[in-house]
Amino acid sequence: MGKRSIPYTMKYDIHTLARLSGVSVRTLHHYDAIGILVPPRDHANGYRRYGEKELLRLQQILFYRELEFTLGQIKKILSDREFDLLHALAAHRNALVAERARMQKLIHTLDETVDKLTKRKQMKDEELYDGFSKEEAKRISREAKERWGETDAYKESMKRVRNMTKEQMDEVKEEAEEIVKDMAQLYGRDISSREVQDVIGRHYAHLGRFYAPNAEIYKGLAEMYITDPRFTAYYEKYHPGLAQFMSDAMLYYVDRIAKNRA
């Protein structure tokens, strides 16, 4: 006798779905407005309610966005009567496998870069961007220069990194990961709680391994955690919503420091 299928009855409001998926409420409103993700409404209060159908559709939207399709293209694909969800998932899996291979190449490139900086291994400058497309390499280089290239913090950070041994670099990375994991464990707590602020204090102090942090720099970093997709993606892999949680806790920490000094 086969397993009985259990009907999917869970319904999420827009704020809960935003927290689960990492997609902002504003974006979900936009998806509704352009007709790419239109959830049914609660008859009692008119609120949006997202069920299994909508969750799977949002997953597809996010997959296609990762592949750099426009929203117009995605809407056309998902609205096609011949659209096959299982076939699409298989295609996405193949794309992710290819992306994994690319990411492994990037990791190798980073390891080679660390060797260059710590062991003075000869490495061509263009190899610093091995694994990135030419466009991506140019964009990263341009953004780094525009954002930090002329700042004392950036220059000091680069100087300290070049002078680190491999053991010191490994220690710094391990410390950073422990901080993120501790914050993930505390996700959902009040950002003003002592436990959360103690970890954020460690995070603030950790930056001192690279440069002397201050309120302005720390506020800018907090903003980047939620505005730069690469920062956000890094923290979201530890816990959905962690980037926003970290950012809020960091801003509270800076404000508390300012008040104590006033």
Image: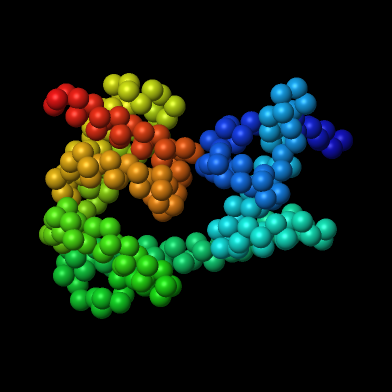
Residue at left offset 32%, top offset 21%: 193
Image coordinates of residue 144 in percent, x first then y, are 29, 62
- Colour scheme: rainbow
Image coordinates of residue 24 in percent, x first then y, are 53, 41
Most foreground residue, 134 or 168: 134
Above or below, comparing residue 254 to residue 79 in the picture: above
Which of the 4 image quarters holds residue 83? bottom right
Q: Is residue 56 left or right of residue 81?
A: left
Q: Is residue 178 left or right of residue 189?
A: left
Which residue is most to the right?
A: 1
Q: Is residue 76 visible?
A: yes
Q: Quadrant of the C terminus?
A: top left
Above or below, comparing residue 236 to residue 154 in the picture: above
Most foreground residue, 98 or 49: 49
Residue at left offset 71%, top offset 36%: 51
Q: Is residue 160 left or right of residue 112?
A: left
Image coordinates of residue 157 in percent, x first then y, are 17, 55
Which residue is most to the front?
A: 33
Most foreground residue, 53 or 13: 13
Which of the 4 image quarters holds residue 97? bottom right
Q: Quadrant of the N terminus?
A: top right
Residue at left offset 25%, top offset 41%: 218
Which of the 4 image quarters holds residue 46? top right
